[in-house]
Every structure is written in C-alpha cells, then in structure tokens.
Amino acid sequence: MHTPTIIIFGFTGDLARRKLIPALYYLIADKKIHNPLIVGAAQEDTTVEIVLERAKPFISDVNELIWQQLVASVVYQKTNVTIARDFFDLQRFVHSLEKKKKMTGNRLVYIAMAAHFFSQITEYLSESGLCKQKALDDKTWHRIVYEKPFGHDLKSAQVINECIARSFDESQIYRMDHYLTKELVSNITLVRFANCVFQPLWNNRYIDQIQIVLDETIGIEGRGGYYDHYGALRDMVQNHMLQLLALIAMEAPEKLTEDSVRDARCKVLEQISFVDGMLGQYEGYQKEAHVAVDSKTETFALLALKIDNPRWLGVPFYLKTGKYLQKNEVAIHIKFKKTGTFVTHHNSLQSNWLTFTISPEATFSLRLNVKKPGEQNTLLPVDMAFCHSCMFGIRPSQAYEMLIQEVLNGQQTSAVRSDEIEASWRLIDFIKSKKLPLYCSYKRGSEGPNEIAQYEHKWGITWSPK
Ligand code: BG6
C-alpha cells in the first residue's frame, strides 16, 4: 500500500471536483493508498471542507468513515502558479508536513490545469525543489502528471516538451490520457495479442473498415472558455481517439510493457494520414457562456483516415465524435470482409463485426452468421458477447483511479510519451490546415449534421448494425 504525498495544482477546478477527488476517495476506500498527504493548491481563497463538499456529489454511496479519512488527509495552500515565491512557500509547507508525518517524501504532482501553464509550472517545480530531477535516492521518487490536452498544437507541445526535458527525466513524466486507463481500453492490447484467433485476421486481407466512435449526449458543461479554443479535433481526436486508433492498429510490441508499447503506438501514429472530413456545430453553441458569438469551433467531427503501411493498405479508419448527440457511445467497431465461400451471394449474409464498447457498458462482442431456426438456408446474425460487469460483478476501477495507481507504481505504459504527443499534434495541425467544411447547426439530441449522409455515401461507411 502506498503512503505518498499527492500535490494537486488546480485543486478547485472542474477536473479535481469531478474526477480526482472522487478517485482519491475510492483509492482510500479500496485501501490502495494509506494515510496519504494530499495537498491542494489553487488561487482561490477557500478551505478544504468547501472544496471537498463540492466533490461529494460525484461520489456514489459516500461512507462517512472513509470520507472523514479523506478530509483528514487533505490540506490546502493558496498558490498562484505564475508566482515563483508561491512554489518556494509550497515546498517549505509540504516538506514540514512530510517531516511531521514521518513520510518518505515520495511525491506525485498532478497538474490539473490548462496547458498554457505547463511550462511555467514545470520550471517553478524544479527551481523550488518541490520536484527534483530523477530519483533522489533509490527509494524516493518525484513524478509529474500533465493532464490532457498537452498543448494546443504541435509547436506549443514541443515547447512544453523542451521545457520538461531541461529539468526532468522522461521516466518521471506522465502525460495522461484517461482513456488509456479505462478497463476495456487496457484490454484491447491483450485481446488482440493474447488470442490466436484474431492474429491472422488483423490486416487488410480480412478487415473491411474500422470505426472509432466517441458520441456524447452531454454538451460542453460550462467549459466554454476552454472548449471554444479547442473544439472536438483538439479535445477528443488528438488524444483519446488517436490513442484508441493506435492500440487497434499498432504492430505487436516486443513486450507488453512501457516503452515497447509506446514505441509501437508511436510508430503507427506517425503512419496515419488524413483522407477527408467534415465538422459540425450544435444549434445554440454560440450562445453558450464564454463562447464567441461568431464562433467557428466544431463540436462534431467525422474523419476518414488511413494508415500508410502494408498491414492497413486500403483499410479506411472512420472517426466520429460529437457533443449533444442522440446517444452515449464510446466504441470501436471492426467490420470484416464477407466470406468468400458458396454463401457469398446469399442475401442474408452479413459481415462479421468485432466491437469493443468502452461505455456506457464495458463489453466486447463478435457478430457471427448462424442458421435461422426452422429455415433451411436463411442466415441470422447473432452476437457472442463478453460483458465486464456481468462476469466480474464488481465496479471496475474507474479511469482516474487506475491512472493515479499507475503513477504511484511508476508504470508508464498508459502515459503518452513526448514523441507520441508530437505525432498526434502533427496530424491534427494538418487536418486543421485543411479548413474542413463546418455544418451549423445540428439539433441537440440528433445524430449530428444532416450532411453526414453525403459523406457516408461518398466514403462507403456502413455503421455497425445495432
Ligand atoms: C475529456 C474531454 O477529455 O473527455 C471532454 O475534455 C469529454 O470534453 C470527456 O466529455 C469524455 O470522457 P469520458 O471518460 O466521460 O468518456
């Protein structure tokens, strides 16, 4: 069990409230961390009690005893991240508490703030000694987590990477993408490489197309100031969607650990190229708080990409994401080519589909053709499905709990390396430069802009059957 110091910059923000504080609660409840020192840092004049109360609604079935343990673990220090002196004060404050509590001094620093603060915070962390380069000795470590999005484009990401490299070792750095720690996402690599049945089929000979869908029913949830500068391409495609694509398309890593997986992901990210795309904006977006009245920011994106290597030659990858859509669906659908046997011309023959559903329910399923009972030659599609909660019953650890645990364990597989980040920004910059058509305004609760139909027809998309 870990007894770390966890320092969170942006402690009064949205991410801390919705995700980080609940994750810490569950880690304490599950006895994954013991007696931690949690230091909240932000610019607001506030108290631990106020900040924690705001996070309480995001925890289901709060156990008062565990809650009190959490409250007792947290301290708050008002900090302005643009002032060097505040970091020196914070370092003295943290050091004295660690000494008092006889802690080892292992520190996890979580930067839950906007990317334009990253370089400044990195410099001050180093100057103040709040984070020291590499291990202090064999047993003590300092690790820094950077929340996504890491930068705004390739140039800004490179600037942050250079700044980090001046003060820290890459082994201390965790550029996090919480999608990589979701239960079913971390399953993709294992399902792919641990099952002999999939290995020979995973290429352009058998796969017709791959669809990655991140549809949300929610909107921008009061984050207009951030979202209007990012939009769907930078908020969802650059990180979550390209990482999912990389896991599906990468070559077999030498080992299932750290740099082997990151090498494999990076290689395929560098081989992705853009084919075509369209964007959309939901009706009423320009009236959202902190959004420009004439905003051209996209809240919906549909892209066709390809991968320039022999395995994927000719296989289209379709990516679709949007806010305020009809349903919540995070899934990867793999459509196989139809079989080349005597039933090829059979009317009822359908493609096989392998689907990884990440949410709302963690499942994966394989759609097969079987004989319809009572009829001689009619085929019926059926799904063989694995449902995580049906089988294991337990609440799967949520992405941010896994993420914090991986950092505590010094596990970097789910952290995105500097070259991966730069490869994905390179692609997004290229797509942005294409000035894709933006269709305003799709109705909230719809499937997106009506014009999607044109593109489906043009590209030959057949969405996975429900
Ligand atoms: C975040 C995006 O990274 O991921 C949000 O900034 C999005 O816009 C969220 O809603 C989706 O994550 P999840 O885990 O709820 O699917």
Image (cartoon, rainbow, N blue to C red):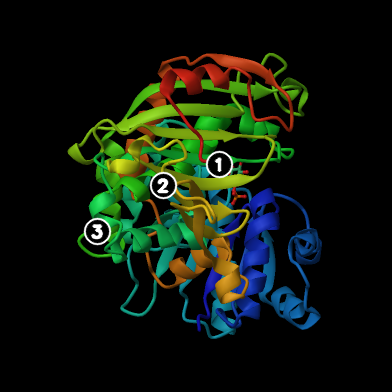
Disc number for residue 260? 3
Residue 41, given in percent of the width and then of the height, sits at 64, 57
The C terminus: image quadrant: top right
Q: Which residue is mark 2?
A: 352
Which one is nearer the viewer's eye here, 350 or 455? 350
Disc 3 on helix, strand or loop? Answer: helix
Q: Which mark is first along the chain, 2 or 3? A: 3
- Disc 1 crowd rating (10 Å Cα; few below 14, some 14-19, many 20+) is many
The answer to whether residue 339 of the structure is visible from this angle is no
Q: Is residue 466 left or right of residue 120?
A: right
Judged by depth in the image, the label closer to the viewer, 2 or 1, is 2
Disc 1 on helix, strand or loop? Answer: strand
Q: Count numbered badges in the picture.
A: 3
Q: Which mark is first along the chain, 1 or 2? A: 1
Three-letter residue code for mark 3: Ser
Q: Is residue 197 left or right of residue 140?
A: left
Disc 2 on helix, strand or loop? Answer: loop
Does the residue at mark 2 contact the one at mark 1 (Cβ under 8 Å)?
no
- Disc 3 crowd rating (10 Å Cα; few below 14, some 14-19, many 20+) is some
**Does 8 sit above or below residue 267?**
below
Q: Name the residue located 31 percent from the left edge and 78 percent from the top edge.
A: 138
What's the distance in space between the residues labelled 3 and 2, CA to CA?
Answer: 31 Å
| Disc 1 Cβ-to-ligand 1 distance below 8 Å | yes
Q: Which residue is mark 1?
A: 214
